Structure formats: C-alpha cells, structure tokens
Image (cartoon, grey):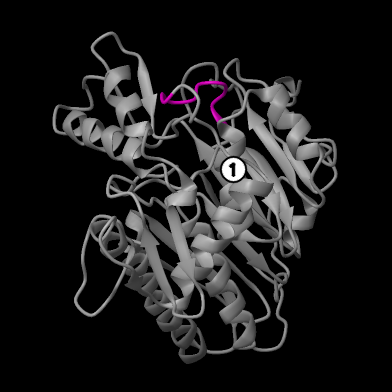
Amino acid sequence: MLMKKILSGLLVFFIFLSSGCSKKEEYQLYSKNFFGPFDTATTYMTYAKSEEEFKKQCDYILEQLEYYDQLFDKYTSYEGIANIKTINDAAGKTAVKVEQPILDLLSISIERYHTLSSNVNTAFGSVLNIWHAYRERAEANEGIGEVPSLDELQTANLHTNVDSIHLDQENKTVYIDDANVSIDVGATAKGYAVELIKNGLIEMGVDNFLLSGGGNVATHGERKIIKEGNFYLNECREKFCVGIQSPRDGAYEHEIDDPNYEDEIVIVVEGESIVTSGDYQRYFEDEEGNRYNHLIRPDTLYPANYFRSVSIITEDSGLADFLSSAVFLMDFETGMNFVNSLDEVEAIWLLEDGKIRMSNGLKDGDSIYVIDKTRLD
C-alpha cells in the first residue's frame, strides 16, 4: 500500500542499450523521462517516424499523468478538482461529486478486495497515515525513527471498514459514513493510471512502446528496428525487454563481471505489464537497524518482511499493481499458491536469502533470463 512522499527509484527498468541498428523505413527510437507526477520518475520509449509525432505522445502522457496524480492525491487539494483528499475531508459529513475515474478506481479496488484479496483495502488509510507520519519524521532524521505502538495502530484500525465507502454511480458521488475512515488508493492508483494511459496511446494509433513509472511497466508491440549488439537474450534484438533490479544489499552480492549488469532477471515482453513491490525503496530504520518498509500487513498492522520483492506479470497494469501489493503481504507459499490459481498471471520473488523463485507458468530460458543461475531455487 504505497504512500506518497519521495521520488522513488525504478524497481524495473528498460533494456535499450546504445548500439547500432538496422534500417527499417523511417522509424527512429525516442525516449523521454518525466519527473513529478506520482512522486516518481516515469520513462517512455517508442519508435516513431518524427520528433513531432513523439512530442505529441509525450504531451499526452504528461497531461494524463498530472491529471490522475491530482485526482488520486490524498494529501493535497487542487483548485477546481474533487480528489481523494476532498472525499476524506468530507468523511462523515457529506457525499462528494467526483469525476468518473475516481468512481471506477474505487469500484474496481473494492471489488478486488472482496473477490481477490483483502490484503489491499482502500479504506486502510487511517493506519497508513500513522506509518506515513512516522516515516516522514524518520526521513527528517537521516532515515532513523521510532515505530508506532500497537495500541495506536489498533485504534486506527477500528476505522478501516471498506463498507463505509458508498459509491453512487448515477449521481457520481462518493460518501464515507465514518468520519475516521480514510481512503488510500496508493496500492492501485499508479498502475490504474498507467493502464488508462496505455490504452489512450493505443487509441491514438501508437503500436509500440514501453511506459514505466516507479516499478510499474506497461508495454505494447515490439521494436520497429532490429537492434545490434550484445544482449542477455537474443529476443531482445527484435522485442522489448524489461529488467528486474536487485535490492543490492543483504544476500544479493553478485560475482558477474559485467559493467552492464544492473538487474537480476531480464524478461521479453509482448504486451504484458510488470509491476514490482519491494522493501528497499521506501522505508526507515529504528536505532537498532531494523527496517520498516511501506507495505503494511492488515493482520499485524506492521510491515511485511517475508521476502525482498515480488514482481507480477500480467496484461493489465492496474491488476498487476493490486496483485503486487497483495502478494507482497502474503508469505511465500501462500502467495505462490494464490498466483498459480489465477489465469494469465505470473510472479517472480526475490527471497531474503538471495534465491529467486517463479510461479508455475515461468521458466528460465523461455522469454525469461535469470542472470545468476545459482540464485534459482
């Protein structure tokens, strides 16, 4: 359940090394970074016929990122926009008229809470707000801070009933019937926004791209130009590839003598989305050096510490975002069984001991390359 605050590094990133390429029509590779929306860095790459065509796509992406970032923001008010903060401020008082994307995101998040996993609760904001405040204080103290008491968390947890959120699709309103309930869509908003933007690009006629924002990657199509050079996978010459980064601490030291080594796994993508949730981007430590990440278990009210990261692979970026948070909050065996029960969903775990595990539908060497084979479990 993501909490907005810092500019996070990417847990997954693009594989497009500088190298020669074969000519194919007049296409050229373009890429651009956007900084700000959703408190993260967003990268876009595509093959386009002109810089003007590429700029039109980038303008659309930035406009949409800023729009959804403001719409789903629970911390800041914006003039003329009724957003998540507006709804929370009106909790227990009045219904708030909102734009359709808010209704759609809340509706699908609540449905998935009931049908997929109650680990991701849109009404869990009162507990997450406490952890956010403690993490902010720790950040002001060089990353060292105190931990909230169980009593404080349990009191907040009395106000996390998802049924307190009432959606009126006809009148386009949201009403929270408990003044102490706080909506938090951090575990779903970014992936949902990326999915909407992906679909918008496709409707514009863009037939190839990679769009990545803070651990959320959406893809469509394949390379327009065959790349030349050395690749971990031969398929990366013609298709897009995505890498899953290492936490770079704990049991993750590597002995591969390769200046381009940046990741644990390289994945060939053809329209899939990949979303990673991990414990090594947003966290603080106490004075004893214990780490407290931003992903909070609803049963204990404290951060999950089962493994270092999990990456979900499926077509829908919004679903992948929801599932990455849900599975991170499950122990490994439970998460493995859960993912294996879902159609067209796969997962990759980086375990605490440095081992790599994959769901049943994935196999090293089949569109997936694990760089250090000794990590495979």
Point out residue 145 in the picture as x, y percentages from the top left corner: 21, 22
Q: Is residue 11 magenta?
A: no
Taking 105 as reference, is 67 above or below it?
below
Point out residue 197 in the picture as x, y percentages from the top left corner: 53, 74
Q: Is residue 277 left or right of residue 41?
A: right
Please tell me how many numbered marks the rendered image carries.
1
Crowding at mark 1 (Cα within 10 Å: few <14, some 14-19, many 20+): many
Which segment is the magenta one? 301-309
Q: Residue at x 85, y 45 (%)?
A: 366
Among the 4 quarters of the image, the one containing residue 314? bottom right
Point out residue 133 in the picture as x, y percentages from the top left corner: 22, 36
Helix, strand or loop: magenta stretch: loop
Q: 322 or 122, which lies in front? A: 122
Q: Is residue 181 left or right of residue 170?
A: left
Point out residue 200 in the picture as x, y percentages from the top left corner: 57, 80
Quadrant where the image shows the N terminus: top left
Q: 139 or 236, which lies in front? A: 139
Quadrant where the image shows the C terminus: top right
Among the 4 quarters of the image, the one containing residue 150? top left
Q: Amino acid at mark 1?
A: Ser
